[in-house]
Image (cartoon, helix red, strand yellow):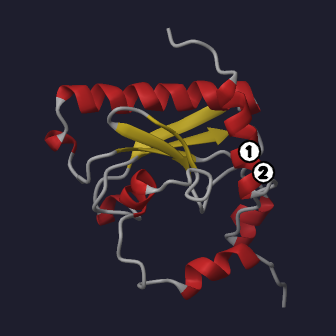
Amino acid sequence: MNRLWAPWRMSYVSNLGQDEKCVFCKAAQSDNPREVLVLFRTEYSLAMLNRFPYTNGHLMVAPLRHTADLNTLDDHELLDLMLAVRRCQNLLEDAAAPHGFNIGLNIGRDAGAGIIDHLHVHIVPRWAGDTNFMTVLGDVRVIPDGLMMTYDHLATVLKAERPAP
């Protein structure tokens, strides 16, 4: 039997069903952005690392207002959300030089949303060869960098980010 060690998942597994608060609302209200993986906030949105990433640097952008429906966002919130998505893409380009991106929303459980009651956009950096035999044969993802190391690197690059167009 092969074993994959992922001790950081224990806190997630042991707390399943105990914390009923929305991860995005909790992050928006936190006084410790690093602890909740928030990289930046805007007037209407927040950007944070995905605690269970598909690849290194997998970010999520969510409106501050708790909603699951794009139609409930006013034009200011919607524009702010998309500007934050663009800012995340630029941050990842500067920090990690990916070869491409998957950027999108999963709205509803049947569409693949893991968090169905709070709209969020995934920004997933991609590199040639990032889907390797582990994913194909073992249904396992290998994330080559620690979550907090990735956070700290992105936070450092964010401080020196390029100006918005």
**Place of residue 130 in the rendered image (x, y in percent of width and height, measured from the top left):** 74, 47
Could you say where residue 79 lies in the image, as x and y percent from the top left? 30, 25
Task: Identify residue type, mark 1.
Answer: Asp
Relative to 141, 17 lies left or right: left
Query: What residue is drawn where x is 19% and y is 38%?
Result: 73
Residue closer to the observer: 42 or 140: 42
Residue carrying label 1:
152
Image quadrant in which you'd find residue 51: bottom right
Query: Residue most toward the right?
Result: 2
Percent x, y of residue 164: 52, 13
Image location (x, y in percent) of residue 147: 71, 56
Q: Is 40 displayed left or right of 120 in the figure?
A: right
Residue at x 78% of width, y 57% of height: 146
Residue nearer the viewer, 126 or 35: 35
The residue where tag 2 is placed is 149
For label 2, the crowd category at 10 Å Cα-Cα, with few meaning under 14, some 14 to 19 and many 20 or more, is few
